[in-house]
Amino acid sequence: MEISFTEENYLKAIFSLSRLYGDAEVSTNQISEHLNNKAASVTDMLKRLAEKKFIDYKPYKGVRLTEKGRKTAVKVVRKHRLWEVFLVEKLKFKWDEVHDIAEQLEHINSDELIEKLDLFLGRPKHDPHGDPIPDANGKFYAQKSIALAEAKVKQVLVVTGVSDHSTQFLQYLSQSGIGLGDHLKVDEVNSYDHSLKVKVNKNHGLFLSHKVALNILVEVKS
């Protein structure tokens, strides 16, 4: 059964939202806000996806992906993240420039191409934003990350990803000298607004707002 680019985008959105909310059912309003589409249009698409057995959908009850829908969504996610790795590592795009291009490339329907791309890139475990890349069987690489805002003073941390993928946020981090793999150390947490003073790669001190710290993912090293 053929599936359109739009249908793939909806399945990917439902998958992302369900993971965000702990594999819970996803509401029509959440999908509408995520995709910036009108609720009526979302409802029409959900009915179509239900007819094709990609989702379990009952009006006013929320949406869940079927096993068929999850496999399709994960496949799109895998392609998107592999293409982002290719664009950054091989074509030298910046990490804030690749999302829209990968959105187009993710719809190329060739298992052989994606397998060769994965092999060419060395079987990467995460994309340039730190998001895990599922393998060909749909399994994700487990990563023990916390938000920087949860870190304690004097902890040594490694940046593993971001929760906010917006161009503005990624550019802000780049301008602040923060990227994947960088080492951070929390020197101080302000008791009033929970802003942080951190040291980046043992070189320079930096003040980060609580909002920024919530969107930087780190792994505790010591």
Image (cartoon, rainbow, N blue to C red):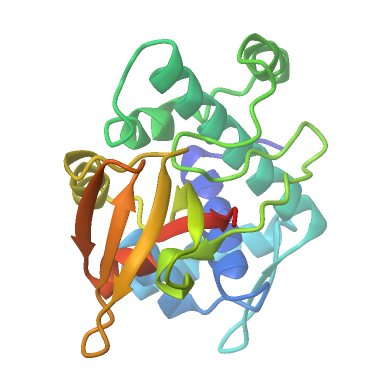
Q: Is residue 211 left or right of residue 123?
A: left
Along the viewing direction, whichever of 161 and 184 lies nearer the viewer: 184
Give coordinates of residue 213: x percent, y percent: 34, 66
How many numbered marks appear? 0
Q: Is residue 51 left or right of residue 79?
A: right
Q: Is residue 172 left or right of residue 99?
A: left
| Residue at image location 31% in from the left, 52% down from the top | 199
Residue 129 appearing in the image: yes
In the picture shown, does residue 109 fall above or below 62? above
Q: To which quarter of the image does residue 146 belong?
A: bottom right
Give coordinates of residue 75: x percent, y percent: 67, 38
In the picture shown, does residue 198 fall above or below 126? below
Give coordinates of residue 41: x percent, y percent: 39, 66
Along the viewing direction, whichever of 82 and 39 lies nearer the viewer: 82
Give coordinates of residue 170: x percent, y percent: 27, 45
Residue 3 appearing in the image: no
| Residue at image location 34% in from the left, 70% down from the top | 33
Q: Quadrant of the N terminus?
A: top right
Along the viewing direction, whichever of 66 and 203 lies nearer the viewer: 203
Q: To which quarter of the image does residue 110 belong?
A: top right
| Residue at image location 75% in from the left, 46% down from the top | 71
| Residue at image location 33% in from the left, 15% down from the top | 92
Q: Quadrant of the C terminus?
A: bottom right
